Amino acid sequence: EGRIKSRQWQAEDGSTKYITEIQAIDFTFLTTKKESEANKENKVDEQTKNATFNPENNGLPENDLPSQLSN
């Protein structure tokens, strides 16, 4: 719960500057920092585990080049 506040001012160079702020009065974290960090580690482990690498083509598809360059 909160509000949005917009304001403007003149900068030293004469230009008009604008800012919009979100002012939170009440909020709830959906996960703790510890849970969030654990999820990041699990995702990296899954990506590494599922990744395959073919050294013959550097892990790229065979026809990764545009058609005019592949001839």
Image (spheres, rainbow, N blue to C red):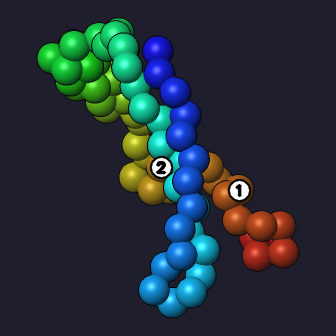
Determine if residue 21 is in view.
yes
| Label 1 element class | loop
* Amino acid type, label 1: Asn
Counting other residues with Cα less than 10 Å from the Cα at mark 2, is it few (<14), some (14-19), or many (20 or more)? few
**Label at residue 17:** none
Q: How many marks?
A: 2
Front residue of 53 and 48: 48
The kind of residue tagged 2 is Gly
Residue 2 x %, y %: 47, 21
Q: Residue furthest left?
A: 34
Residue shown at 33%/23% (left/top)?
43
Residue 62 horizontal side relative to residue 23, left or right: right
Q: Is residue 27 left or right of residue 21?
A: left
Q: Is residue 62 above or below residue 52?
A: below
C-alpha gap between disc 1 and disc 2? 12 Å
Q: Position of residue 11 (x, y in %)?
A: 49, 79
Place residue 30 in its image quadrant.
top left
Task: Give the residue displayed 77% in from the left and 67% down from the top.
Answer: 66
- Mark 1 highlights which residue? 63
Point out which mark residue 59 bears. 2
Q: Position of residue 10 (x, y in %)?
A: 53, 75
Q: Secondary structure at mark 2?
A: loop
Residue at point 15%, 17% (across, down)? 34
Vertical side of 70 occupied by 38: above or below: above
